[in-house]
Image (cartoon, grey):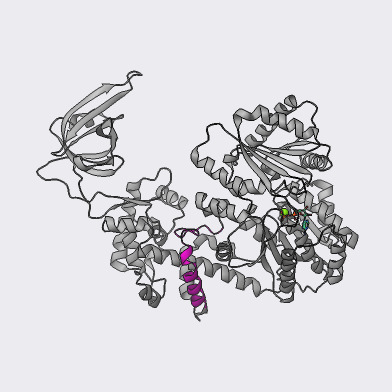
Amino acid sequence: MSDWSREDVSTLTGVGPKLREKLQRLGIQNKRQMLFHLPLRYEDRTRIIPLGSIQSGQRVLFEAEVLQAAVSFRRGGRSRRVLIVKLSDNTGFITLRFFHFSSAQQQRLEKGAWVRGFGEARLVMGGLEMIHPEYEVFDPQSPPALDEFLTPIYPTTEGLHQLSLRKIMRQLIEQLKAQGMAETMPRQWLEQHNFPSVSEALLALHNPHDQQDVQLIQRRKHPAQHRFIVEELTAHRISLLQRRQQIQQRKSPRVAAAEGLQHRLLAQLEFELTAAQQRVIAEVMQDYEKNMPMLRLLQGDVGSGKTIVAAMAVLPVIASGYQCALMAPTEILAEQHKRNFSNWLEPLNIQVLSLMGADKGKKRAHKEQMIASGQAQVVIGTHALFQASVEFAELGLIIIDEQHRFGVDQRLALQKKAGDGCMPHQLIMTATPIPRTLAMSMYADLDYSQIDELPPGRTPVKTSIIAESKRDELIESVRKACAEGQQLYWVCTLIEESELLQCEAAEATYQNLQQQLAGVSIGLVHGRMKSADKERTIQAFKAGKIQLLVATTVIEVGVDVPNASIMIIENPERLGLSQIHQLRGRVGRGNKESFCLLLVKNDLSKQVANRLEVIRNHQDGFVIAEKDLEIRGAGEVLGTRQTGEASFRIADIVEDKAWFSEARALAQMLMQEPSLAQSSLLQDLWIGSRQNYSEVG
Ligand code: ADP
Ligand code: MG
């Protein structure tokens, strides 16, 4: 039986190539996807509201008679004409204003005409007003029919009108009513929860019957929504678990324990591992014994010491004859890892190599040759690592640092560097504090480890908020701090999207500070500098030759200069809380009392001020992330918005937490069915084009 819902949208009346292209921008190709394009909200055009009972801000349908219509002129000349129409019904009055109008329009809105209009009413100086309402003039003897259902308002894209969307949707809804749609969920489960069938649920959301239904929908309490929320969470979970199964069926590098080497590494360190670090290392070692590819997410707050854990994970892999790759999101961080790993591993006769985007020509060819021959045992770099020309002799372990900075596809590209069907082990590290239950749902394909304690002796960073008007005093205290031998960061933030602007702002600040702080040695790093220059500056800062480092948020991850104890962040309100927390993690690494000063505009809004209070009052990345989640939503906080990972259509991983366990149980049940027909239908619907992410090898 052919399935009508899989037909291309172009088979619908009125959908030509142009419209089809616009729909595609919304991720819609077939009829089924179109039907799952659900309304954002609804407008009520099913009843006429008497003018006397309309409240300011309401979007309403009204009917009234024109009392007077006149064109008036606003200051500013000829083109500034306004058509002002006063109307009344027997309960009250309303004034309509049109800033663009034709003379035909003006003629029809004459005294005595009846108008039915829809728009947002506002109370202006005691009278009701509407600007540019939708309206029609009608014959009061035979008023046009009212809508039977509430009008859905759909998410849309430039140049695509609600009216066209509604028109297409109406055709589809007719087809859905006539032909129904294959059920994607087990009937028994639907009955058990009293959930509607897929067709009923779609109809209920596209055409809710009454305000009561709409209110349920707005509060995410409608059974039709619940059904789809669980369905999407389930589909997502199944796709992750299937990815996991696929990976685990692959051959993995055989890695034997290397306790001797690990002891030698530990003996070199000037610190003892924390209990949490030891536990995580043990978890990794157990993974190696399992004879299937490791897939482990390691979460640990800024400064919790993930790097040494990574180094300990490397040793058995090298000892077993494989290579390791460590990928970091910035060159600064990659350089720092290179230094640490060289210090730690070269005494153990392990070859550490870095590979950056800036490595070109002969140098690059040489490095690539070292990687291909297997001479380079640990290779550290940025995304340059997964370029086509890089071939590993035998890759046994991939470590990804600060994973939230990478897209899924980048991670998978590196995964593909593994040769002949062998899937390298993977350790994925992040400082983004993902609440555990959330992590387990979002990353159901990964095992989860957490470093939940900081090394001893860290002093909490004292954070204060300073108004721009105190800038000069702040600069004076910077001078004093430098005179006392302190080291400081001065971080310039700007709209994150524009790296160029951010760099320019940092340049300007750098020059100003140089003028104001004569005699202080000041350095500058930003993303547009040559990597050698960046590296030289960071090294000079580390060596104490630079006292004040002006930087963009490129230093957000990784940079480790324990002597630096003060950080000034300009315009912190432009950053997410977790990002500020991460930046602030650059100080408070030594045993000195440390400070983070948030330099804010003088007229800070209440909401922004409240947000910054969270940072001031909390040191724990988890607490901060929880608050950030509440304020900004999951996509922003987890960095999944830009990477496209785990972006849901209807479910919301914060609001719908209560459904996680239901989805878990359901996914398990569906995966146990001998035929996966049902879950593949689910995948098709909910994961769709994102499915290619789950391809491996
Ligand atoms: P992150 O988890 O943010 O990547 P790092 O691995 O950069 O943290 O470690 C932060 C700092 O803490 C480094 O200077 C590192 O040498 C130090 N460190 C790591 N583990 C310990 C420990 N157990 N005791 C003391 N210092 C440690
Ligand atoms: Mg780190």
Please report the residue visible at 38 percent of the width from the left and 59 percent of the height from the top.
35
Residue 75 placement (x, y as % from top left): 34, 19
Q: Position of residue 197 (x, y in %)?
A: 35, 70
Q: Residue 390's image quarter?
A: bottom right
* Picture quadrant of ligand 2: bottom right
Quick check: can you spot residue 92? yes
In terms of image quadrants, where is residue 481? top right
> Does the segment drawn in magenta span residue 60?
no
Residue 432 placed where, x, y %? 63, 55
Magenta range is 645-671
Left/right of residue 252 with respect to residue 14 in the rendered view: right
Q: Nearer the viewer, residue 409 or 47?
A: 47
In the rendered image, residue 658 lying in the magenta stretch gets the answer yes
Picture mark count: 0
- Left or right of 186 in this view: 598: right
Residue 411 position, x and y percent, is: 66, 59
